[in-house]
Each structure stands twice: as structure tokens, then as C-alpha cells.
Image: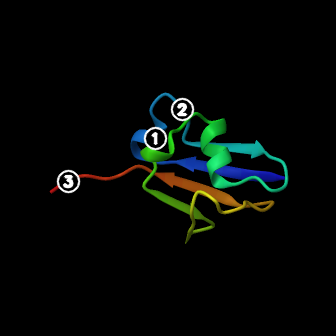
Amino acid sequence: MHITVKLFATLRKDRFDTRDLEIPDGTRCADILEKISIPGADVALIFINNCHAGLDTILKDGDTLALFPPVGGG
């Protein structure tokens, strides 16, 4: 299966902005975080194809996974 992973804000530091990955069937979002060495606690929002998802969501061929860190401000 082929997916696209997009990282935003601080998650990009020393990593990448966008990367295409080949993954096996049944891969979850949590598996991708492990593969790219991002702790789950560092991710506040997960979107698949512009829809909110969770760590246990199973990815499908052609999906775009977007990962966002917590955002602070005031």
C-alpha cells in the first residue's frame, strides 16, 4: 500500500515535510509514528484525508496522513 505522510510545525524539525511510504495492509497510525520515530505524546491531531482520526485507525491505500503537534499561544 502507498500512503503520504505530512508533518506540521515542530514535528518537521529534523524530519521531513511530506513523504510517500509503502506500508503493509493493516498498518495503523500508531505504527507510522513508530516507524518515523515520533512519540505518540508529541502528536495532538491526526487527520486522514482531511478527517479526524486516532492512533488505532487503520490506513488504506492512497491515504494522506497529516500529523500536528500540540499548539500553544495566547
Question: Disc 3 or 2, which lies upstream in sequence?
Answer: 2
Question: Disc 1 or 3, which lies upstream in sequence?
Answer: 1
Residue at mark 2 to residue at mark 1: CA–CA distance:
7 Å
User: Above or below — where is 16 with respect to 20?
Assistant: above
Q: Secondary structure at mark 3?
A: loop
| Residue marked by disc 1 | 11
- The residue under label 2 is which amino acid type? Arg
Which residue is pictured at 81% across the width and 60% down the height?
A: 61
Q: Which mark is residue 15?
A: 2
Q: Are marks 1 and 3 in contact (CB under 8 Å)?
A: no
Quadrant in which residue 35 is drawn: top right
Q: Is residue 61 left or right of residue 52?
A: right
Image coordinates of residue 8 in percent, x first then y, are: 46, 48
Image coordinates of residue 63 in percent, x first then y, are: 71, 61
Q: Is residue 24 left or right of residue 73?
A: right
Q: Is residue 28 left or right of residue 17?
A: right
Q: Classify mark 2: residues with Cα within 10 Å, few (<14), some (14-19) or many (20+).
A: few
Question: Please, which residue is most extreme toward the bottom here?
Answer: 51
Quadrant in which residue 22 is drawn: top right
| Residue marked by disc 3 | 73
